[in-house]
Amino acid sequence: MATVLIVDDEELDRVVLRTILQRAGHQVVEASDGDEALEGYGGKGIEVVVTDLQMRNVHGLELITILRDFTPRPGIIAISGTGEDQLDMAHMLGATKTLRKPIDPEELLAAVNLVLDGGIADPGAVPPA
């Protein structure tokens, strides 16, 4: 199983995501915003980042841009309840998979498995550099 970082400024959303992931056997680290995620990232062996896009301080799109330059690079799953435009932008910036809120548990676990398997969400897409 993987170590997954959940980044969301809504505590209830973090609880839901944490519960789904922990029940599937994953280790979970949480952050309430992008700044906290970046401060607590190092040394935790994080393989997957599940990030909301609408957050205070470091916006989810900015976080994705920063994370894509990390080595090793984590798999990134962007989540949002604000619409397709931001999710499309997240994918263009480097998110492997995007999901709309409210999160379906099976879709979340499938996305985590996709990321861990090194897959890309769109078979015709070129993986981000």
Image (cartoon, rainbow, N blue to C red):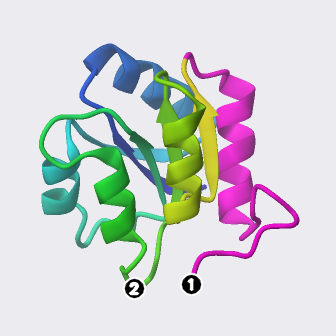
Instruction: Indicate the quadrant where residue 20 lies.
Output: top right
Q: Residue at x 59, y 41 (%)?
A: 25
Segment tinted magenta in the rendering: 102-129
Q: Outermost residue toward the front?
A: 85
User: Within 10 Å of the Cα at label 1, are there few (<14), some (14-19), or many (20+) other Cα atoms?
Assistant: few
x, y (%) of residue 7?
Answer: 32, 41
- Give the camera-side residue of 37 and 57: 57
x, y (%) of residue 86?
Answer: 48, 40
**Which element carries disc 1, helix, strand or loop?**
loop
- Give the camera-side residue of 71 and 81: 81
- Disc 2 marks a residue whose amino acid type is Thr
- Give the camera-side residue of 24 and 53: 53
- Give the camera-side residue of 64 and 18: 64
Quadrant for the N terminus in the image? bottom right
Q: Residue at x 68, y 38 (%)?
A: 109
Q: Reading the chain from its start, which is encountered first: label 2 or label 1? A: 2
- Disc 1 marks a residue whose amino acid type is Ala
Q: Which residue is mark 1?
A: 129
Q: Residue at x 39, y 20 (%)?
A: 13
Q: In the displayed structure, does residue 73 sit left or right of residue 123? A: left
Quadrant for the C terminus in the image? bottom right
